[in-house]
Amino acid sequence: MAVIHHTTLTPSKLELLTSWLPTQPWYEGDGRRPELTKAGGFRLDDPQGEVGMEFMVVTDVSGDRPVSYHVPLTYRGAPLEGADRALIGTTEHGVLGRRWIYDGTHDPVLAAQLHALFVGDVEAQDQNESDTPDPSVTRSFTGAATPGPIRPTAVADAPHATDIVADVATADGTADATVDGAVDGGRGGRLTMRVTRVLRPGEADSAGVADVLGHVAAGWRLPDGAEARGVFAVITDAPR
């Protein structure tokens, strides 16, 4: 269970994201410095209790129309080896000390727990309260559940999204891909989890993704206070 500490972060998450977002290929600000507000999201728990995971929505109100971005974040007490390019920044936590904040699409712990959410093995947690499930986050999965662990092999940005490609092991932990690389029931294989980056109310940016097997949907707040809802991620057994 993740413990949510209501304390200070210096610099804040929004300050770090203000510098980081314009460097991303899916940012729609045309080089403009964003003006960000926190708009919603949810969390997942790390079974080992080491890595914080937040699926955060921030809305940029700097342009002619607001744009909401979905940024999965992981929080670590030490650097993640080999993930320098995914580092958003470091911050001083009022209780835990220095924390390394990463783009969670590059973090294998987040990838594993996102897959577990798709297949129904874990519950989404409230963004702001400890040990509190968030039933507003819904998920579906129409493929055969695969009991083995996943191993991320590649992360690539797509228009308005980021793809996490992973090998899926069999129940005994060995890789067993089919000829075409697809996930085959409990035998293992390969899958792609596409994380939506630019959120549209009621819409998933799944263009170009074949054979969608499931999705994760959640809500966020618009600048006028209205509630919006859309698809945060989809899963497919056809890697790009």
Image (tube, grey):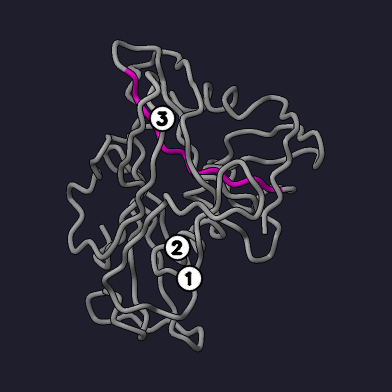
Q: Residues within 10 Å of mark 3 (few under 14, many from 20)?
A: some
Q: Tell me which amino acid carries mark 2.
A: Leu
Q: Is residue 186 above or below residue 64?
A: below
Q: Which residue is mark 3?
A: 221
Q: Looking at the rendered structure, which numbered label has been put on residue 201?
A: none
Residue at the far bottom: name it.
172
Q: Secondary structure at mark 3?
A: strand
Q: Residue at x 62, y 60 (%)?
A: 46
Q: Residue at x 55, y 47 (%)?
A: 126
From the viewer's perspective, is 169 left or right of 67? right
Position in image of residue 200 (x %, y %) = 27, 34
Separation of marks 2 and 1 at Cα, in angstroms: 6 Å
* Contact between labelled residues 1 and 2, with CB atoms less than 8 Å apart: yes
Q: Tell me which amino acid carries mark 3.
A: Arg
Q: Quadrant of the N terminus?
A: bottom right
* Magenta segment boundaries in residue numbering: 66-76
Q: Is residue 191 above or below residue 41?
A: below
Position in image of residue 65 (x %, y %) = 29, 16
Q: Looking at the rendered structure, which numbered label has been put on residue 121?
A: 1
Q: Looking at the rendered structure, which numbered label has been put on residue 117?
A: 2
Which mark's residue is nearer the viewer, 1 or 3?
3
Position in image of residue 240 (x %, y %) = 25, 57
